[in-house]
Amino acid sequence: MQSLLLAYPDERFHAELPLVRRAAAAFPDPVGAPLLRFADHAEQAPRTVLAADYVATFDHRKRCCLFLTYYAHGDTRKRGVALLRLKQAYARAGWRLGDDELSDHLAVVLEFAAAADDAHILVEHRAGLELLRIALRDSGSPWADVLASVSATLPALSGDERTAVARLAAQGPPEEQVGLAPYIPTAAPAAVSRPPGTPGGSR
């Protein structure tokens, strides 16, 4: 469900809000309540305003980037390797990404985690997730509730993860740019193609 709420708020997004409400009501309160708050906001806000807010938040603020490997690697060579590893992990599970989709977009990772019942990619990128959650919270973004719901499904932060979050908050991601094309597109990806019979989940 969280992945649906991180998509660009187009007609499909608004059509799926009732489904999100029904599913969120069945989740434990730390997971479901933030999703219901966001759904309230999304239904009440003018659609053009919500869409403009989405673009201003996720396309124009580096600390609110939805591409998880950016937090650890920035636009460096290591990020290309990390993207490839994620794509290979999806392929092993029978998933196929479109040519215009990046494997580290949070909505894609959430779809995979829910369908495969495997949150290891989210856990591996926990520092970046927490930095995104904090940035959204501090900016007063309604999408902070969606990230709060995601965090509530994951194990508590360990000492090393807290250190990593603090480092990212203070320094930001690496900035090596040599020989690289930008990795951050302005458009959110479409949903991942799932293998037949794959169930959905809370993410």
Image (cartoon, grey):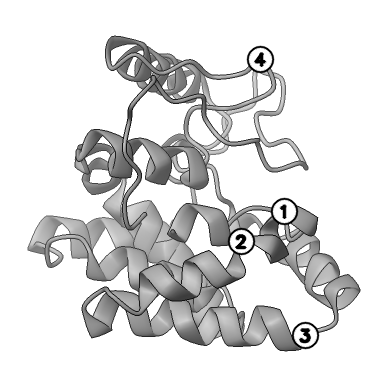
Residue occupying image coordinates x 47% and y 82%: 36
Res. 166 in view: no
Q: Please, is residue 51 above or below residue 76 in the view?
A: below
Q: Are marks 1 and 2 in contact (CB under 8 Å)?
A: yes
**Mark closer to the observer (1, 3):** 1
- Residue 185: which disc? none
Q: Secondary structure at mark 1?
A: helix
CA–CA distance in space, label 1 to label 3: 16 Å
CA–CA distance in space, label 1 to label 2: 6 Å
Res. 47 in view: yes
- Residue 45: which disc? 3
Residue type, label 1: Arg
Residue occupying image coordinates x 20% and y 38%: 118
Picture quadrant where residue 198 is located: top left
Q: Which residue is mark 1?
A: 12
Residue type, label 3: Ala
Q: Which residue is mark 4?
A: 99
